[in-house]
Amino acid sequence: MLKASTLYIVVVISLLIAMISASLLTIAFYYRLEVQKKTRLDNLLHNENSGREILLSEGFSDYNKDVVMDLFADQKDSLVLRKEFWGAYEMGMVKAFELKDTLKRTFLIGNAFSDPNVLYLADEDRPLSLSGKTTLSGDAQLPKSGLKQSYVDGKPYEGKELIKGKIRESGRDVPPLDEKLVQQLERNFKPEKGLLFNVRDSLINSFFNTVQLYRLELNQSTIGDTKLKGKMILVSDTVVTIGATSTLEDVQIYAPAIIVAPGFKGSCQLFARDSIVIGKGCTFNYPSFAGVFKPEHGKIQSKISIGEGVTFSGILMTYEKKRSDLQTMISLGAKSCLKGEVFATGYIKMERGITVYGKVYAKRFIMQTPATLYENYLIDVTLNRSLLSKYYLSSVIFKREMPERRILKWLN
């Protein structure tokens, strides 16, 4: 005969078994959900990577519109791709989605910089003279008259060899730029509409959003004590001054003239018609761009002036479509260091102690001493191609055969 407590024990054991079984089923259910979620995430990562490769390929030429793709034609692995220009660079956006799961990224695109040349000097039937502690490291494209040593202020050229690299002949002009991109940048000086700029503290606009275009009024000529970051463009009809206390990242600024106060630090793209003046001790982080685009009938000499001790990582450029009597100029202050490319359709004026890691393009060099103005002279200047970072990427504004596009910077 069974004891009365036996039934109680059986019930308890049954409940325990039921609870354990239910727990195992619940664990299995949620484990399966996590496995499915992880599988979808892996698929999204794979699809997002495929989307990036498509955007970086030469065959993708759709700009300023969303392109929807179904990678495997199964209505599951879908992509939204978009490419547009962001200043002098390209910007890509890829969104991968499956069911309710979405993964998206935005990034700047640059061209691989494999050019071994440190210098391109247009052939105006005059040689390039070297004096003092000048160093040229890298290949060069120079006039037929080549290089020669010269005395300046009683001092000879101190190097053992004129250039550490090969020399090829240059053309009569600097290499052409991408005219379509140049025209698009010039149109940005006169936008059809824009918002009133009333930011007092900070403004951040994700690159997933549409661009925010602001027009600066005449009484808003100074940008100071302000943090601006992301997908925004500032346009002004007068001189714009960027204060040292402002923080800029990835924004574009268009104005007739731009002044950057001494001590500024940031990364941005500056576009002007007449001049850009960068004060002493400024630091522009990569990828920055400063370009002056002279109007076709401009009456003044469009110019970029770099102060003493400036560090600039990116691209400096002056451009004019047709050669004028007052050709464009880039003036580089003493002890400045430029990492990237310096391009001038006219003159480049250098002071002693300049260092350029990258490549320089010019029609003519100018150097001013207390006694004389020298043309096509380099005095106590260092131009070194090999010291440019191997991760440096150039702009699509420079025409190159079979360009290799890579991710320049992650934005979001």
Image (cartoon, rainbow, N blue to C red):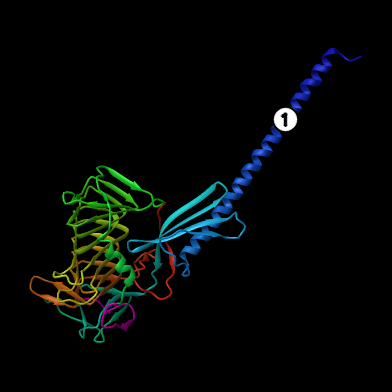
Query: Residue 183 placed where, x, y %?
Result: 30, 68
- Up/down of 28 relative to 140, above or below: above
Query: Residue 372 placed where, x, y %?
Result: 9, 75
In the foreground, 176 or 169: 176
Residue annotated with mark 1: 20
Indicate left or right for 250 with 307 as reference. Answer: right
Query: Residue 221 placed where, x, y %?
Result: 18, 51
Snapshot quadrant of residue 341: bottom left
Residue situated furthest right in the rendering: 1
Element class at badge 1: helix
The answer to if 270 sits in the magenta stretch is no
Indicate left or right for 248 with 71 as reference. Answer: left
Q: Residue at x 69, y 32 (%)?
A: 23
Query: Residue 31 placed where, x, y %?
Result: 65, 41
Snapshot quadrant of residue 396: bottom left
Range of magenta residues: 158-174
Residue 61 in sight: yes
Indicate left or right for 17 with 297 as reference. Answer: right
Snapshot quadrant of residue 383: bottom left
Q: Residue at x 16, y 72 (%)?
A: 367
For label 1, count other residues whose C-alpha is less than 10 Å away and answer few (under 14), some (14-19) or many (20+).
few
Residue situated furthest front in the rendering: 192
Classified by dominant secondary structure, the portion drawn in magenta counts as loop
- Up/down of 234 relative to 14, above or below: below
